[in-house]
Amino acid sequence: MITGARTTTRIAYAAAGALLLVVGAQLIGQFELAGKAWPPLTDVLAYVATPSGSSLIQRNLLVTLGAAGQGFVIGSAVALLGATAALLVPILRPGLDRFAAILNAVPTIALAPLLITTAGREGTPAVIAALSVGFVMFVATTSGFAATSAPQQDLLTVFGASRRRRLALLELPRSVPAFVDGLTLAAPAAILGATIGEWFGAPQGIGLLLVSAMQNYQMALLWAAALAATLASLVAYLLLVQMQRVAVRRFS
Amino acid sequence: MPSTLSRPAPERAVAPGAPPRSAVSISGADKVFTLSRGRTLQALDAVDLQITEGEFVAIIGPSGCGKSTVLRLAAGLDTPTNGTVEIFGAAPRTLAAQHRLGVAFQEHALLPWASVRENIALPYRVAGRRVDDARVDELIELVGLGGFEKARPKQLSGGMRQRVSIARALVLSPDLLLLDEPFGALDAVTRRKMNAELARIWAEERITTILVTHDVDEALILADRVVVMSGRPGHVRTVVDVDFPRPRGPETTRSPEFHALVDRLTALLDAPEPM
Amino acid sequence: MSRLRAVGAGALHLWPVALVLVLWDLWVVLNGYTATVAPRPWDVIADVVDGFGDYLPYTAYTLGMSLGGLVGGTIVGFVGAVLVWWSAALSGVVTPAALVIRSVPITAMIPIIARVVGYGDPAVLASTVLICFFPAFVFTLSALTAIPDSGRDLFRVLGAGRAQLLGRYGVLHALPSLMVSVRITAPTAVLSAMLAEFLMGANGLGALFSRARSYMDMERAWGTALVATVVSVVVFILARLLERRVADRVS
């Protein structure tokens, strides 16, 4: 409200922060303050600009994004179904809640042996991404369902709405903001999950690239891959934040 | 009379015959807020308000008339765009820095992790003074919270929280007490009860007080003078002296004179101003 | 009696876990997998119980690294946020940068830390500290910038400076948010410790896991996964308990 000039200051501060980050990273690399393992950013960018470098990063990033995207969709869908089941069959609720919490606490790396036998080396990244997304979305959706108020429930009951109609008219639309809220967190989780999956012998992907670059001392490649993963996760997050703004305006 | 400063109550009342000291002096105060995209909002237009020491002044007006802004000027939380604000001849900030201000808002702003006793003692700690336990006990009794010293805010009712907030405002025996809708969030019955209690407490401490409220009855039960404000932009519409005898119990509030004054002020709040 | 019943009901609500165990067993038996492909759950549990002494030092190491990182990162993040809050300009500059760094996937951060710090314990600890740092920093800073106006006004009227506002109000006001960040990062701390151990392979459950895998000792590998899950769940439950205690005390 009373913040006309402050928005511009905020943007200026944020720009200064970004600049500081970039210049700092560059200087640390330039003067080898953190050793040879921290190359100047310009070297990393120069590597990305080479045709072989850019095609390598691009190819692997697409694989990772594909796995993350698959996991994102599957995980969200399963979580939505699970949360709806917990809503319609209340006796399932405590068990599913607890299971979701345990699933969240499971270090995803621990699931690798199971997944490699079941989903195979190529399928594992998508499954781990789906698991990471699933927990976040289950929690977000159940809290969204809980956001409906008792008077709203009573109103629809008085009008003689069936359980299914109440779900369609009240709980599903009401939970949209929380659901989209969850998606903003789930997108980076999907990318992280996919890269973890790729550590276990996937033929391609940013996760694989990170490990092999580390083991082979290819610092420019390591940093370029890390940068690509970060950018992907940041962009996914920011896109979903935009979507969330729309959802909040429309549904609450 | 240096001893008069350290003692709270009746001794400080203005000596008979001495000219009353000016406590609050707001002259020609304008307040303009800058909104986004370069737009501005004039909250106050040439507000004048003079309050003498020991006086209880209520400011009433419809919401958005700038009455809280006047209080914030007196508290030094805002500064006027034009005009001057002086409290006991100095800038309001000076008074705050000397820990001579007491304040209670509609939001009680109690520390949720601290007990009733610790909340009331907070001004001592902020001022860096040793906590006067006897004074804290006295205030706990005064606001009727004996037995609740160790309770935390979430264990108290809304009315009790406001009592703590008022005790906290009084604990340092401030020279100026600022109350911004302190009972605004209470139900009508609790509110009347708190009005009566505040009147009793004020009668004991006699601190110069500004009360902002939108409740005409509350203003008339408590104040020596009622300032009626109007909005867009906020300005003083009229000032009414209230000379019902104290304490103003049911016999006062049920009297036709009281009702007549309530009706007159309510009409002033509702009616558009003559151009 | 009612307490016993509550515990019973609590155990009953673990049905999905039991279901997973049964499905796992069925899946192994029906597919006719040998122990080198996928062991049966009972064999894995037996390996953990029999080989408890083998698991213990690795488990202790991972637990220590996770808790050390969690505590260290949280403290550093909290102090950092308090310092940055002191100056509006500084917090404006640092906050967006922190958000960017926060979206670096751990899988990208750990290999870099491993190379910059060098393989070994410091690199594992640095990974967990760094990963717990950013949430603590962001949560604390957002709580500090969200100090209610009424509290801010109260302290100004009482004649308090910024230090008093912070010491008597801000720090405790931010504590519940800090605890939320502890709860959220607790499982992540275990995960990142294990990922770092897995990658650098000197000590800890991650290293044990990596070794068992390369020797095709599937019971040990799955057993490590089981122990890691228990460790992570325990850390998470402890963090949640602490969060509730703190929230109850300061709000």
Image (cartoon, coloured by chain):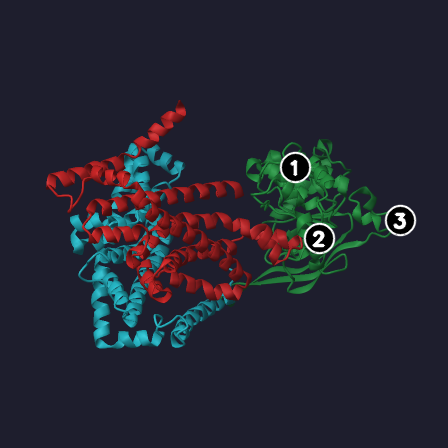
**What is the secondary structure assignment of the residue under circle 1?**
helix
Tell me where residue A8 appears, x and y as whole percent. Answer: 47, 68
Q: Is residue B42 left or right of residue B244?
A: left
Residue under circle 3? B17
Q: Is residue A159 above or below residue A140?
A: above
Q: Are dots 1 and 2 on a single chain?
A: yes
Sequence-wise first label, 1 or 2: 2
Q: Residue furthest top?
A: C1
CB contact under 8 Å: marks 1 and 2: no
Please rate how many residues cluster around mark 1, counting C-alpha atoms within 10 Å: few if below 14, some from 14 to 19, many from 20: many
Tell me where residue B50 appears, x and y as whole percent. Answer: 75, 55
Real-space Cα separation, disc 2 to disc 3, in angstroms? 29 Å
Residue under circle 1? B194
Chain letter of mark 1 equals B
Colour applied to chain C: red
Real-space Cα separation, disc 3 to disc 1, in angstroms? 33 Å
* Chain seen in cyan: A
Sequence-wise first label, 3 or 1: 3
Tell me where residue B102 appears, x and y as whole percent. Answer: 69, 49
Residue under circle 2? B99
**Circle 1: residue type:** Met
Colour applied to chain B: green
What residue lies at 32% left-to-right and 39% top-to-bottom?
A97
Sequence-wise first label, 2 or 3: 3
Is any atom of residue A2 visible in this view? Answer: no
What residue lies at 42% left-to-right and 44% top-to-bottom?
C239
